[in-house]
Amino acid sequence: MDFEFKRLGPLRGELTVPADKSISHRAVILASLAKGESVVQNISWGDDVKSTIRCMRQLGVEIVQDGKVTRIRGKGCAGLTEPNDVLNCGNSGTTMRLLAGVAAARPFLTVLTGDNSLRRRPMARVVEPLSMMGAVICGRENSRLAPLVIRGGELKGIEYHMKVASAQVKSAILLAALDARGETVIHENVSSRDHTERMLLEMGANLERKENEIRLRGPCELDSREWRITGDISSAAFWLVAATIVPGSEVLVRDVGVNPTRSGVLTALKSMGAQIHLEDYRTVGGEPVADILVKHSGLQPVEIGGNIIPSLIDEIPVLAVAMAMAPGTSAVRDAAELRAKESDRIAMVVSVLQQMGVEATETADGFIVHGQGKIPGNCRLFPGGDHRIAMASAVAGLVSEMPVMVEDFNCVDISYPAFLQDLQGLIR
Ligand code: S3P
């Protein structure tokens, strides 16, 4: 489905965004490894989490969905059974990398594949540590690409220094370590999102965290739990930018996860001059949560780089739209990881901005935007199947001088199936 976005009235009102995708994946996987029934309220309805649910069912886990309630009947790590077919992780890197960790510790054969995008994404980063733990893993191109064939078995704990700041890699190691003999120690130079650690602690795992170091002593049993998953800051980010740049807007996004390892977008937007206020700050299921109020305001340019990058990595496409609306030169650096996402997001962001008439250039590890405080638009964009590129383009269209047509807009179903309805609900 192609969809045209154009200048509309202000965005006003309240909304909740889809449940956090990262936490939803983990709730399904960890509950599947626990003993007993876990109840998850308000799981993400995006296609990525559906992929995780489908794969866990293929591994023998009973998962029942009834409205907003998902019941997962875990039988412990040992309760998983050999799947009789390939597990298709669709577009979801989190599904593939976390399940690689689960499969590594199981005494059977698992084959993980995915769509065209996922089969191009780097997998050596999980193959290497899981092989060190004792799993036998092969993949295409010298085990750098999926499909991955995993012959799991008895694992041993390892000491591992992270080479990229990746929560998916860290989580894969922790999931494998749950069923490994001895201690696993992970050293992180730069912190990545820590949902797995928080959830494992809530479920009674033998896990300790010190600055930049995580220790887990296996084998451990996990307790079943009730989770209520709050809104995804990565989805809220589209409205935070949209309400900031569309004149006259005022939007309250309720119930958003504001874990500091995820909330760099708030810091970046505030440093650009955005009017963003957190209200009713609270903790839900071990995760910080708040309502976020955002009002239209002018923006100034910003340079983003260094340790903040992992905490806003998924929000960079929409931050690029904010940069285009900030008169002056903005830059993103230290973000080469963007090239390994659902698309090469450095190339995609720059190409989309240029097609909209915004001056932007690629660098090896980021991009530069020469913002003029306006977006000419008048273009037809192909987001390359990347949900976040499609939604960032839509947000740009809300302020562009001429309409922006986004092709294949359905790709937003990966994380935000109700994006268009939510947009409709805010237009005044
Ligand atoms: C995710 C971690 C991040 C992020 C992705 C979701 C997760 O990827 O970009 O959208 O749920 O663990 P990396 O861990 O590869 O940085």
Image (tube, grey):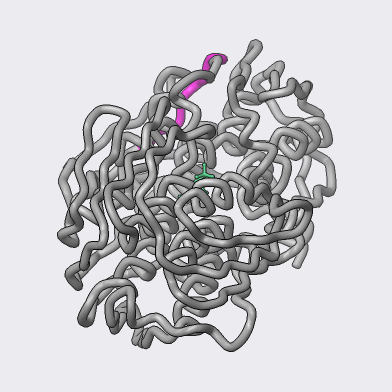
Judge whether 318 appears above or below 70 on screen: above
The mark total stands at 0
Classify residue 188 as left or right of residue 371: left
Judge whether 207 appears above or below 154 on screen: above
On the question of residue 3 being in view, the answer is no
Magenta stretch encompasses residue 321? no
Identify the residue at horizontal 61%, vertical 21% (top origin): 332
Q: Name the image quarter holding residue 258.
A: top left
Q: Which is more toward the observer, 347 or 155?
A: 155
Q: Percent from the top left, x then y, of residue 182?
A: 27, 52
Q: Residue furthest top?
A: 328
Q: Which is more toward the observer, 56 or 291?
A: 56
Judge whether 309 appears above or below 186 on screen: above
Identify the residue at horizontal 28%, vertical 76% (top origin): 76
Name the image quarter holding the N terminus.
bottom right
Classify residue 161 as left or right of residue 183: right
On the question of residue 284 being in view, the answer is yes
Identify the residue at horizontal 30%, vertical 79% (top origin): 69
Q: Percent from the top left, x then y, of residue 279?
A: 21, 39
Identify the residue at horizontal 64%, vertical 79% (top origin): 86
Q: Percent from the top left, x then y, of residue 150?
A: 58, 67
Q: Percent from the top left, x then y, of residue 270?
A: 40, 23
Q: Name the image quarter holding residue 180.
A: bottom left
Judge whether 200 appears above or below 161 on screen: below
Q: Which is more toward the observer, 110 or 297?
A: 110
- Main SS, magenta region, reads loop
Magenta stretch encompasses residue 298? yes
Q: Which residues are magenta?
A: 294-301
Classify residue 196 as left or right of residue 338: left
Classify residue 380 as left or right of residue 268: right
Q: Which is more toward the observer, 279 or 56?
A: 56
